[in-house]
Amino acid sequence: MSLNPITATAAAAYTQQTGTANTKSTKQTDKADAATAAASTKDTEKSETTKKTDNDTAVIYEKHVSSSTGKSTSHAAVIAQLKADSEARTAQLQSLVEKMLAKQGQTLATADDMWSFLAKGNLKADPETIAQAQKDVAEDGYWGAEQTSDRILSFAKALASDDPEKADELLEAFKKGYKQATKTWGSDLPSLCSDTYDLVEKKFSEWKNSTKDASDTSVTEKDA
């Protein structure tokens, strides 16, 4: 069927309008899609940035430790170490004193031709051994009161790094060692051991007061 000029013109106009409308619609759709894509991209970038920030934060995060807590822990550790050092010093001296006095008494027993305190089998010492023992327990002998007390004091000073303030602490350790040696001996220790005890007390007292004496001398010299 043929169209008349008016109808053809109207049809052409409609087609043109429809095409234009479709073109506008397509452009609007493209713009909307572009906007959506851009928004999506921004959201993605923002999400990635947030994740990166979170990750970075997780990596550099360090647990905060209170300085006061750290100081408290350190202080407690120092106290514990000092206590352990003190106990070790006194235990060493106590053990040394116990062994030395037992040996001193045993040597004296040999010198007096008595049965050796720690011997098994009740064997008497031979004359040569007795002569050496008598020499050792003499006043100037190795196991005499003077030399034995000197060795005890020297050992105590070494344990205390020659600090007179620890004299009382180590003197108590000496007394415990003496008491233990007496218990091991089974009765009162020989007089040689008690003489050693008296000299140790005297020498510890002198050691303890050495700092005070030095201080008094310094003050006197300054005043002069």
Image (tube, rainbow, N blue to C red):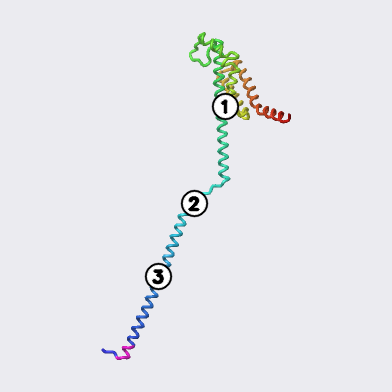
Which residue is situated farthest in the right direction here?
224
Look at 35% across and 80% down and name the residue there.
19
Relative to residue 159, is residue 41 depicted above or below?
below
Q: Which secondary structure, mark 1?
A: helix
The percent position of residue 157, horizontal first and vertical second, equals 59, 26
Q: Position of residue 204 (x, y in %)?
A: 63, 24
Secondary element under disc 3, as helix, strand or loop, is helix
Residue 79 sits in which quadrant? top right
Amino acid at dot 1: Ala
Question: What is the quadrant of the N terminus in the image?
Answer: bottom left
- Mark identifier at residue 150: none
The stretch drawn in magenta includes residue 8: yes
How far across and how far down the image is residue 139, in percent? Answer: 60, 14
Q: Pointer 1: what residue? A: 158
Q: Secondary structure at mark 2?
A: loop
User: Crowdedness of circle 1 by 10 Å Cα count: few (<14), some, many (20+)?
Assistant: few
